[in-house]
Image (tube, grey):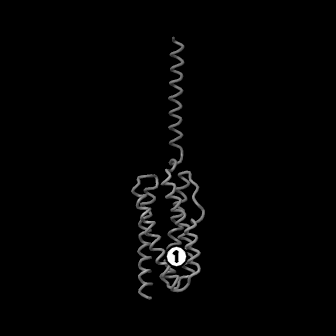
Amino acid sequence: MQNYRMIALAFAAAFALAGVNAAAQTMNAPRGTLAGADQSFLNEAVESDLAEIQMGKLAQQKGQSQGVKDFGQMLEQDHSQHLQKAKQEAQQLGMTPPSEPNAKQKKMYDQMSKLSGPQFDGQFAQEMVTDHKEDISKFEKQAKSKGPLADFAQQTIPTLQKHLQTAESLSGQQRSQR
């Protein structure tokens, strides 16, 4: 009987140590695996940054008005900084971020690259209004999620709102010039 108790105690000790070891590994792991929605959000955020950087550069090259050129520079700078933060988040969460914009974003870039002058300026401003409204909605939803990317999303919203206001102002200017 005594041997059975010793064996039982040995098993209990082994299970307890295994539990402590598993807890320690969890605490030392990256912030955790992402839920599908969080991973999707971060992928979209990176793709959006990559697309906005490209569109910003395009606006600096093809924009007719100084306002469009300046906005393009703002987009390139702000989204380059945000891209670095997004990549850091991905790395901390054990995720490999995308390396290029998605197919829809590439198509938009191709369409915009064929325009010039006032036609480019007007279309660019309108596309940036639409795009930033969508982005703000996604980031606000993520900020409310209380998930691992909530703070990241919350910190991004003011910049996206600044971009939306600038795009709306440019869009209004383009319409009044027609």
Q: Which residue is at the far right?
A: 99
Asked if 177 appears above or below 60 in the picture, the reply is: below
Q: Is residue 111 left or right of residue 171?
A: right
Residue 25, horizontal then vertical, whole percent: 54, 40
75 or 167, nearer to the observer? 167
Residue 166, horizontal then vertical, whole percent: 43, 76
Which residue is depicted at the point 55% across and 59% down? 87
Which residue is depicted at the point 41% across and 69% down? 161
Res 139 → quadrant: bottom left
Residue 164, horizontal then vertical, whole percent: 43, 72
Residue 75, horizontal then vertical, whole percent: 50, 72
Res 3 → quadrant: top right
Which residue is depicted at the point 51% across and 64% down? 82
The C terminus: image quadrant: bottom left
Question: What secondary structure is marked by label 1?
Answer: helix
Asked if 105 appears above or below 27 in the picture, the reply is: below
Other-residue count near label 1 (Cα within 10 Å), few / some / many at <14 / 14–19 / ≥20? some
Q: Is residue 168 left or right of residue 11?
A: left
How many marks overall? 1
Residue under numbered circle 1 = 73
Q: Amino acid at mark 1?
A: Gln
Asked if 9 appears above or below 57 in the picture, the reply is: above
Q: Is residue 159 left or right of residue 76?
A: left
123 or 173, nearer to the observer? 123
Q: Which residue is at the far top?
A: 1
